[in-house]
Amino acid sequence: MTTTKDGPLTGLRVIDLTSVLLGPYAAQILGDMGADVIKVEGPEGDTTRDLGPRRSPGMAAIYLNANRNKRALCIDLKSADGHAALMRLVKTADIFLHNMRPSAIKRLSLTYDDLRATNPNLIYCGAYGFNQDGPYADKPAYDDMIQGVSGLAASQSQLMGRPGYMPTVIADKATALTAVYAITMALYHRERTGEGQEVNVPMFETMVQFHMLEHLYGGNFEPPLGPVGYPRALSPNRHPYKTKDGMIGVLPYVDKQWRAFFEMAGRPELMDDPRFCNIAARLDNIDAAYQVLSEIIETRTSAEWLRDLDAASIPAVPINTPEDLLEDEHLKATGFWQTMEHPSEGTLNYPGIPTTFSASPGRVRRHAPQLGEHNREILKEIGMTDNEIDKMISKGILVSQAK
């Protein structure tokens, strides 16, 4: 089904006072879904503007990948005029999103109470390192720190022999997704009641919930019925498996799949082994089950296994490198990878929007903006004159690198 309708958040305005990855990624998703996202930066700009390869100053790869579908306002909020201009903008907003520490947002007089007085219908979302009611409330937080304190890094010990960080900023991105659903739930509440509210999304608690969903395990019960930690996920034998000529990912899971796998391997008797006869037994002996799996997979080529496992409806995939994804046949067929002509950066590749809507799909409408690219446009929308804007520029309150 094709449609020309705009995304489900069309008509909503978001003030995005965030930096690095957590907040910008959350705001980008809202923009992908149609919201008018105004990225507000100080004169120094978002730190990610300088992370990665770039063709122009302040337009590095990581910034470009987390800030599409936004307009940019670069303004000194520490100045009285800059603060006053932002407050006028807040009056027009539906959502205000920031990821500053509580003490920093308080110094700028941009707390929920400050903004609620100006716009009582506002959805105010603060993405913090830690819940504000606890003793860690004002601690600085980055992805590595949250992976560490949430137990995620320590869980790698069984696999790596020491604690380790995942090779992706998972705490930032998982918390960003949590912020998006929290904001949309608050919007739904406002739709029913007309009431705005404050929403706090802490990285620490988000990742503890995320991590411990399966790993609370025996600790679900009081007194505990076993150790904390899901054995299957923590097995050192759970990994991509070597074939005769490469590696593949394989996961027989239910009894039917294991039975088919053992028969395919010419080892049907293994299904009668009390260690492997059902899902509960395999979990109790998961290291042994995966060791047998590994030994069998090594006997054929990747192509042979992928063909036969697919025919038997046993989950199996090639092990893609990040570079492989750019040429993946499925992603190409679904149009996932997109290109856009950027006015200063030339042709850019973007990952597309993974969700689909039959009536109101999101789309990539705007390139990631240059610093202060839309200063004048945005401020004129809230009634400021060219003369007022020019005075702010002359005072250094407004900054722009737009060409």
Image (cartoon, rainbow, N blue to C red):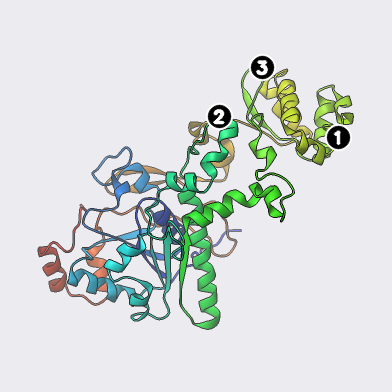
Instruction: Classify mark 2: helix, strand or loop.
Output: loop
Residue 68 percent coordinates (x, y): 38, 54
Give the alpha-carbon distance from disc 2 to disc 1, as whole Å: 30 Å
At label 3, counting other C-alpha atoms closer than 10 Å, the crowd grade (few under 14, some 14-19, many 20 or more) is few
> Do residues under tags 3 and 1 come within 8 Å of each other at their CB atoms?
no
Q: Amino acid at mark 2?
A: Gly
Q: Amino acid at mark 1?
A: Cys
At label 2, counting other C-alpha atoms closer than 10 Å, the crowd grade (few under 14, some 14-19, many 20 or more) is few
Label placed on residue 161: 2
Give the alpha-carbon distance from disc 2 to disc 3, as whole Å: 27 Å
- The answer to which of marks 2 and 1 sits earlier in the sequence is 2
Label placed on residue 277: 1
> Do residues under tags 2 and 1 come within 8 Å of each other at their CB atoms?
no
What residue do we see at 83% from left, 32% from top?
Answer: 275
Image quadrant in which you'd find residue 259? top right
What residue do we see at 27% from left, 40% from top?
Answer: 55
Residue 305 seen by the camera:
yes
Is 130 on the left or on the right of 52, as rendered?
A: right
What residue do we see at 82% from left, 37% from top?
Answer: 281
- The answer to which of marks 3 and 1 sits earlier in the sequence is 3
Residue 313 seen by the camera:
no
Instruction: Find disc 3 in the rendering and name its residue.
Output: 244
Q: Amino acid at mark 3?
A: Lys
